Image (cartoon, grey):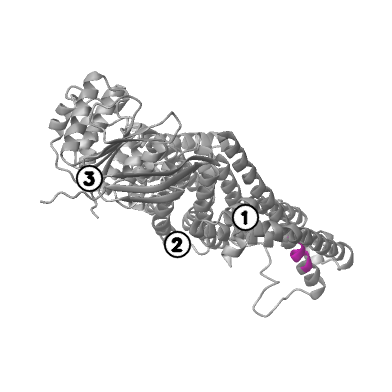
Amino acid sequence: MTISTAPLIHATGLAIMRGERVLFRGVGLTLSPSDAIVLRGANGAGKTTLLRMLAGLTRPEAGELARAAPHHWIGHKEGIKPQETPRSHLALWAQAWGSTADIPEILEKMALTRAADVPGRYLSAGQRRRTAFGRLLLEHRPIWLLDEPYTALDAGGRAMLDGFISSHLVANGALITSMHDAAGFPVTHEVTL
Amino acid sequence: MSAAPILAAFRQAFAEAWAGGAGALLPLGFLGGAAVLVPLGIGSDTQTLKAVGPGIIWVSLALSSLVTLERIFQADVEDGTLDLWLQTGAPMAALAAAKTLAHWLAAGLPLALASPLLALMFQAQASVELLIHLGLYTLGGLAFFFWGGVGAALSATVRRGGLLISIIALPLYVPTAIFGAIAMTGGIGSDGAPLLLAASTLFACAVAPYAMAAALRLAAD
Amino acid sequence: MWSYFANPHKFLSLSAWLAPLFYGAGTLCILWGLWQGLWIVPKDEYQGGDIMRVMFIHVPAAWLSMASYSALAVASFVWFIWRHELADIAAKAIAPLGAVWTALCLATGSIWGKPTWGTWWQWDDARMMSVLFLLFLFLGYMALRASMDSRQKAARAGAILAMVGAINVPLIKFSVDLFTSLHQPASVITADGPKMAAVYLTPLLVSGLGHALLFGGLVMTHMRTEIRQRRIARLTASALEG
């Protein structure tokens, strides 16, 4: 098997407006396998918007964007319904994506075994984050787009996430993430907005 | 394209409908309230009640669809689920249709099924006609939910969008309400009215999902 | 052709003289139509006597209400396909004016209906109902635009709703037509040519033209204001960013 080094994401000249305000313009980046790009910038600089653009959720006002592989998206909002438990949430998305992953095993890796059957409305913020990150393990996808992934995670949670990201990068995966803190995994380059 | 994401969306929406708004109980409560309040309000004259009964049930069906739909897409925007559904690669129109169908099954269909009982309370004769009416309410309710879904998707990012949904959906409910009423009152043109009702419901099911999909992409943007 | 008119600068210079022209010509037409209608034409006892003179406002308003929704739908469609900002500006300008003419049609219809049919409002009259739902479509469109938090979102949401409304208008009209109509059958445009006497028809058509010109002029003024408002917003935003 040959390992392709063709870029997974290639973007040039991206621009976005909010009302009449230009949030950013002329933003470009290239994501290759094993790359980890960290987006930096003050609150309101447009990090979330750029990530949403790369995920195909927000339409750029100008610029070119090409994505060559499937991606995982974890935003600020975890996408967990009040009645969903971590177990049923992961089962639902396994069904939607046609994944046959072992859900109890993922719950164990996420240290969610005890909370596995607690409905979303009773989960703590950290438990909700861990459930959302569980989706990363449901299916292998080369691109991970994570918006401020450390939010609400305790030290153990961060270490766990860093571990997942590092092994994803080693396995030729790639990552674009926004964060304010220092990253606990090897960063290829930083983009400041 | 596989049907798996569409089935999953249906399953999630159905579970949410039952968990969130007490499912079928809320619209049934609506209908029950109307059934009790109308005779108190307009008097218990048998002929009057008989005349207004079908209309009250249509109105309750329309109102209950509006009440139910207010949250269906708004909740998805707030908890981030919409972002995930938009990224499944499945056609958003199909996902929106599946979600709307799930909410109709949870809130619209039970109401139609309960209609013969309410018709009896409004002094209707117990006859096979009530079952035909049940069929008409089923069809009409489906159209209400699909057009209401367009209003719900357009106002998904609007706080207190309920009023907006009503004003958007009201003109779209007109054909269904009229064909349904003509079919039941048995006046001129009532022979073809059930077919017209069915046709307008099919039209709603065919057109509304695309409008919902466009509106939901906007809501996530 | 679209691209030529889609340029806001060309629109501004064109409308600078076209809008006043429309105002002037429109006002003259309306005044002449009203003078003819109120003082010159004989009253028609079958249509309620002198009250039938309200026709010279009512019928043009009815034409305008339908024409303005069509214009709104066309502008929305053009915006949705080609994303010409001017089409969105036009749609935004048409909606409140269309609502005003639609409300005028309903109000004059009620005033005409009370002495003629003995009722202000007739629920099973097809045209009254259609026009009422047209008013709801306009109001819904305006409410939706107003509740969006940016002009881009307002444009997209508005276009979706206007197009959904437009494809439903024939269905709404057809369903409402199934109710018996109190109105007389169509008398201006029929297969055999106009059935109405020329003494009524000419002032009516001139009045209709006047309303259309006035409407057009107001839409242009509205659009000019909106273009400048957006320009101000753009300048303010870039000034704030330094």
Tag 2 secondary structure = helix
Are there few (<14), some (14-19), or many (20+) residues within 10 Å of tag 2? some
State the residue in front, A53 or B64: A53
Horizontal side, residue C216 vs residue A60: left or right: right
State the residue in front, C58 or C71: C71
**C-alpha separation, residue under disc 1 versus residue under disc 3:** 43 Å
Amino acid marked by disc 2:
Leu
Tag 3 secondary structure = helix
x, y (%) of residue A45?
45, 33
Residue range in magenta is: C206-211
Are there few (<14), some (14-19), or many (20+) residues within 10 Å of tag 1? many
Amino acid marked by disc 1:
Ala
Residue identifier under label 1: C90
- Up the image or down, C161 lies above or below A135; here it is below
Residue identifier under label 2: B196
Between marks 3 and 2 in the image, the one whose residue lies nearer the viewer = 3
Q: Which chain carries label 2?
A: B
x, y (%) of residue C15?
71, 59
Amino acid marked by disc 3:
Trp
Image quadrant in which the N terminus of chain B is located: bottom left
Q: Can residue C100 be seen at all in this image of the molecule?
A: yes
**C-alpha separation, residue under disc 3 versus residue under disc 2:** 39 Å
